[in-house]
Amino acid sequence: QVQLVESGGGLVQPGGSLRLSCAASGSIFSIYAMGWYRQAPGKQRELVARIISGGGTNYADSVKGRFTISRDNAKNTVMVYLQMNSLKPEDTAVYYCNAENYHNYNYWGQGTQVTVSS
């Protein structure tokens, strides 16, 4: 089992920045990839950014050049961050931390709201 706890959401003006954090604990040795997904009202959940154990990353086209995902491995915890710059109103959504293990099983955090509005 992997437990995920997110933090860092909030209200920001267009053009502003936020950093989301996700702490993974439990069976962290089984994690292959971690990422951030988001879901806006009335829309499907979509991948925002993902980082695999070897360090490779991929991003949704809509966030490339604005968002950066990073990972910090500690002894009993894995931290994943999403630095979001130049935020736009269309980035408004609930952001979910995700961990995928080597058996393609997915764990999810509880979600954190990001609202971009003036």
Image: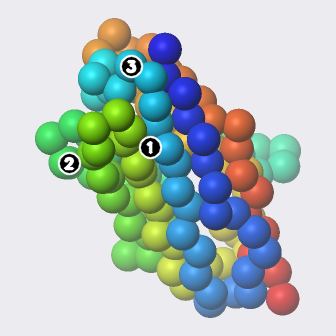
Q: Quadrant of residue 77?
A: top left
- In the displayed structure, 40 sits above or below 96; it is below
Residue located 66% across and 78% down the image: 88
Residue closest to the eye, 22 or 58: 22
Q: Which of marks 1 and 2 is nearer the N terminus?
A: 1
Spot the residue most to the front. Answer: 75
Separation of marks 1 and 3 at Cα, in angstroms: 17 Å
- On the image, the x and y values in percent for residue 90 come to 70, 69
Specify whether 46 is left or right of 118. Answer: left
- On the image, the x and y values in percent for residue 40 come to 76, 51
Residue closest to the eye, 50 or 11: 11
Q: Mark 1 points at which residue?
A: 35
Q: Quadrant of the C terminus?
A: bottom right
Q: Which of marks 1 and 3 is nearer the N terminus?
A: 3
Specify whether 33 is left or right of 86. Answer: left
Q: Nearer the viewer, mark 1 or mark 3?
A: 3
Separation of marks 1 and 2 at Cα, in angstroms: 11 Å
Q: What element carries label 3?
A: loop
- On the image, the x and y values in percent for residue 6 come to 61, 48
Q: Mark 2 points at which residue?
A: 56
Are dots 1 and 3 in contact, CB under 8 Å?
no
Q: What element carries label 1?
A: strand
Q: Tell me if I can see residue 32 in this picture.
A: yes
- On the image, the x and y values in percent for residue 62 come to 50, 65
- Packing grade of label 3 (10 A; few <14, some 14-19, many >=20) is few
Q: Which mark is residue 27?
A: 3
Q: Tell me if I can see residue 47 in this picture.
A: no
Residue located 71% across and 52% down the image: 112
Q: Which mark is residue 111?
A: none
